[in-house]
Image: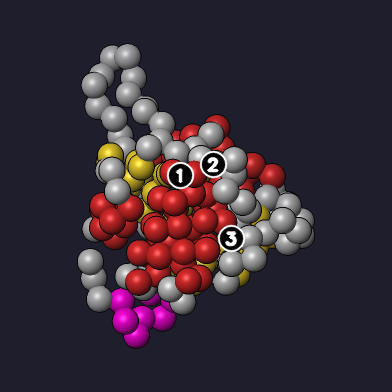
Amino acid sequence: MRDTQGMASHDAPYVAVIGASDATEWELAMAEEVGRRLARAGAVLVCGGLGGVMNAAATGAAAEGGTSVGILPGEDRTGASPHLTVAVTTGFGEGRNVLVARSADAVIAVGGEFGTLSEVALALKMDKRVVGLGTWDLRRDDTDADPLVRVETAEEAVRTALDA
């Protein structure tokens, strides 16, 4: 990991944490730990700003004094995680997934539903490193290659994302 102490937030690595709003206990625990570790590393957490994995990651980042940016689908901040540092309204609905992917230097997918799948695909299309922690398998029938970097722990996820 790089030393990010004293960096302005625009110079720090930005890492998106994506996953389901209706997450399992395991996904919530992993996302919170990822948020904590990103904050300790001086990274800026980017997420969709709502509940589930997004809220858990923001909770972890806040607990460590980190910065988190939620890119919201609606036209107001209703429903935004109270643990976010910044909540940005877009009015774009699911289209905000493009902004989440574009804003990040790397992406960590924790579990996830179809919204997560779209963010994974967009990030890969943008040549971002996508780290998978219990998330979608994207191998095609004609290849054994999975474009995600697979990890098993929050520690590995953060280390791998920051090495991108």
Helix, strand or loop at label 2? It is loop
Real-space Cα distance between discs 2 and 1? 6 Å
In the image, residue 61 lies at what x, y percent? 46, 67
Per the picture, the main secondary structure of the magenta-coloured stretch is loop
Tag 2: residue type?
Ala
The residue to which callout 1 is attached is: 27
Q: Which residues are magenta?
A: 4-11
Q: Which mark is residue 70?
A: 3
User: What residue is rendered at 44% in x and 43% in y?
Assistant: 26
Relative image position of residue 25 (x, y in whole percent)? 49, 44
Q: What's the image's color scheme? A: secondary structure
- Mark 3 or 1 closer to N-term? 1
Give yes or no for contact between labels 2 and 1 (Cβ–Cβ under 8 Å): yes
Residue 57 % position (x, y): 48, 58
Q: Nearer the viewer, residue 14 or 35?
A: 35
- The image quarter containing residue 2 is bottom left
Q: Quadrant of the N terminus?
A: bottom left
* Quadrant for the C terminus in the image: bottom left
- Residue 118 visible at all: no
Of discs 3 and 1, which sits in the foreground?
A: 1
How much space separates mark 3 and mark 1, taking CA atoms?
A: 18 Å
Task: Say what amino acid the circle numbered 3 marks.
Answer: Gly
Question: Farthest residue in the front direction?
Answer: 25
State whether residue 30 is above or below residue 121: below
